Amino acid sequence: MTLPESISPGGSPTTADPDHDDSESRHQWDINDNILPTIHDVDDYRDWPNGHCKAVYTEGSEEARRHASGWAMRNTNNHKVEILKKSCLGVLVCSQRCSLDSGDTVHLRPAICDKARRKQLGKSCPNPNCSGHLELQPCRGHCGYPVTHFWRHVDGVVFFQAKGIHDHSRPELKSSADGRRCSPRDNRSLGYERARIARKRMSPDSVSSQELYPHKLQHMDDPEFTNPMVSNEMICSCPPFECLCGAGTPRSLVFHHQTILSSVTSPGPLVYHVPEPTNRHHAPGERPTSDYVRRRRDSYLALDACGRDAQRRWRR
DNA sequence: AACTGCGGGCAGA
DNA sequence: TCTGCCCGCAGTT
Ligand SMILES: [Zn+2]
Ligand SMILES: [Zn+2]
């Protein structure tokens, strides 16, 4: 497979370092393999896996046993008994994409149950100063389809594999969604009681703070990954390292994304979006590290075929 | 009432 | 054949 020339920034070397120890080299298996390797060391459970990643858990992990995730994942028919498959439901957002003065935005957790989810849609935005309603921002993180999670139990170990990069913000955690479900003040239809709603404060867990980010490169597999370019306003699938400087809104980068977004008719992974020059994602004057260059290239490779399919679909 | 997993069935690639 | 997705069923929380 060949890469577009422009992915290689500034003529930097793009040879991969075979000794580099990352999750991809640690997990040489695929969830569909007939024989999975004997596992010696396992991973700590993570709420927010993102990107094409794998993990091995023990059945001692409550979350792994329940096939849990921070993302709202619903069971889907895999036509395979051994492998449980789930797909992402996305996130509930305000139709007006409102934000508080603090910059907080709405990102409620979609109900897993179809019936319950239908009831959520159309309810008023929890922001007292907003007349918007809740709508579902679907996940299109895997070739235009929802991100999928696969779970497989073999001899007491739990193999986990994810496919796709979520193109939406994180929904609130299940625990805080449960809390609101049980809270009587939230059980009424928001259409009826606007006055009381207006007095209600937004639940702190249903909003996200947009802090200022230091110049720092972060991998999407990082448990603490937060990409300001993946927000309700902006969709960017440039994988997997992005600079978090300036709260993700350096003017040129935003302009670049808007240009890209307006050139496609349907949202989805924009895998051929190649910011140019690549070191725009770095602190001014800093060269991209060879690690950055290598992993960026690898991630483009991983998404290459998938992205081509998606682009083809959109053009029709 | 909602969550979770299962599996039949259908459609499109 | 593979994948996405809809639907209903049943057991659990
Ligand atoms: Zn709103
Ligand atoms: Zn998603």
Image (cartoon, coloured by chain):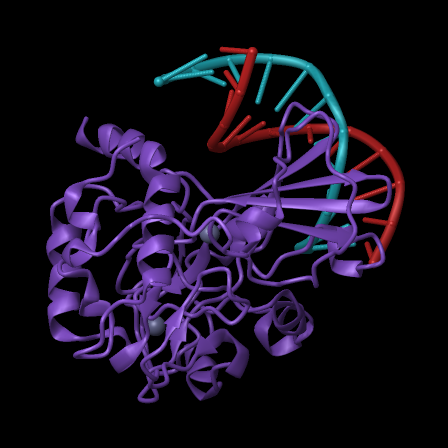
Chain colours: A purple, B cyan, C red
Pick the front one: A202 or A42: A42
Question: Considering only vertical position in the picture, is A68 above or below A285?
Answer: above
Pick the front one: A189 or A107: A107
**Quadrant location of the N terminus of chain A in the rendered image:** top left
Q: Position of residue A151 (x, y in %)?
A: 68, 42
Dividing the picture into quarters, in which one does residue C1 lie? top right
> Which corner quadrant of the figure contains ligand 1?
bottom left
Question: Considering only vertical position in the picture, is A244 above or below A152?
Answer: below
Q: Position of residue A141 (x, y in %)?
A: 40, 47
Dividing the picture into quarters, in which one does residue A48 lie? bottom right
Pick the front one: A157 or A184: A157
Residue A218 relative to residue A223: left or right = left
Q: Residue at x 35, y 40 (%)?
A: A301
Q: Residue at x 19, y 61 (%)?
A: A278
Q: Position of residue A147 (x, y in %)?
A: 48, 45
For residue A231, say whether it is visible: no
For residue A17, say whether it is visible: yes
**Quadrant location of the C terminus of chain A in the rendered image:** top left
